[in-house]
Amino acid sequence: MNDTAKNASRGSVLYLSHGGGPLPLLGDGAHREMIAALKEIAPLLGSPSAIVVVSAHWEEGRPTVTGGASPGLIYDYYGFPEESYRIAYPAPGEPALANKIAGLLQSHGFDAKLDEQCGFDHGLFVPLKILYPEAAIPCVQLSLVNSLRPDEHIRIGRALAGLTNDNILVIGSGFSFHNLRAFFAPSTPEARSMNEAFEQWLVLTCSSREISEAERERRLVNWENAPAARYCHPREEHLLPLHVCYGVAGLPAGQVFRFEIMGKKASAYLW
């Protein structure tokens, strides 16, 4: 059993690329590799007592936590087939855990709040319907902060680091490549080279054991200096769940999963 599998018994940390809207659940061939990767990852995660998802699709002025006992789903996409608005994922909420998360954040200087009305967006229900299709594990969703500061999101993760000791799975749901225009533009050698250059930088930054934790954090905070950073992320909301995950873990990722989504190289990281 590898170290990642051993750690699954106490709770894991996973940053994943969740694909384009509901397409992974609609049989879209351009998401085949991503779906296969998530199915490979699923048994490594064990059976967590609860799941906390930091979604790229929820931003607030301060860290906000879903506090409801039975959150509904938010179909926060448009222009997709009618069936995509009937997707069900009736996972229960976990108000006690939500309160604990808010308390941990507050004790670390964040003005965190609970939102008992907010539902789960597709950053949660799309990947979890693949990882845990039975929807039986309680879930809590945590927002990004709309300052989009990388250092702030690492600190948010550090505030929640103890959660994994309670067999809680922390997921950062984003996308390691998120340039919407590029998905629909012609593929060129230059575009492929920029995509690959950033992915290589990200894999090295997140998983190399030759990098000190101080250097790893510096690289993540200054991610805009990476090769082709702003081509791959014109806006950083899909990258920042990774910063929260690193803050929780504080170590190099134990496993890296690489795949293509809609013709672009992407990745996932498991601690």
Image (cartoon, rainbow, N blue to C red):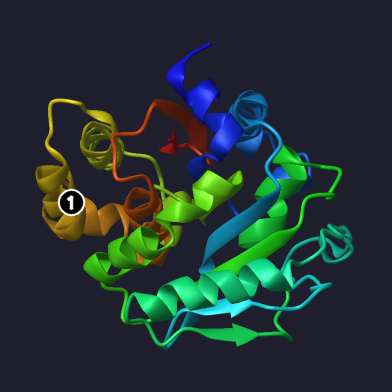
User: Does residue 9 lie above or below 76 as drawn?
Assistant: above
Horizontal side of 166 relative to 180 (left or right) equals right
User: Which percent across, then down, holds residue 17?
Assistant: 51, 46
Residue lying at 78% horizontally and 50% vertically, measured from the top left:
137
Labels in figure, total:
1
Q: Nearer the viewer, residue 125 or 66?
A: 66
Q: Is residue 21 visible?
A: no
Horizontal side of 169 relative to 271 (left or right) equals right
Q: Dividing the image into 4 quarters, which one contains the C terminus?
A: top left
Residue lying at 19% horizontally and 49% vertically, measured from the top left:
228
Q: Nearer the viewer, residue 197 or 119?
A: 119
User: Does residue 242 lie above or below 31 as drawn?
Assistant: below
Horizontal side of 230 relative to 138 (left or right) equals left
Q: Residue 97 falls in which quadrant of the image?
A: bottom right
Q: Is residue 270 visible?
A: yes
User: Which percent across, then down, holds residue 95?
Assistant: 72, 73
User: Does residue 46 lie above or below 21 as drawn?
Assistant: above
Q: Nearer the viewer, residue 67 or 146?
A: 67
User: Does residue 59 lie above or below 182 as drawn?
Assistant: below
Q: Residue 194 falls in which quadrant of the image?
A: top left
Residue lying at 65% horizontally and 53% vertically, measured from the top left:
51
Residue with the mark numbered 1: 217
Amino acid type shown at disc 1: Glu
User: Which percent across, then down, holds residue 140?
Assistant: 66, 65
Element type at mark 1: helix
User: Which percent across, then down, holds residue 19?
Assistant: 57, 48
Q: Residues within 10 Å of mark 1 (few under 14, many from 20)?
A: many
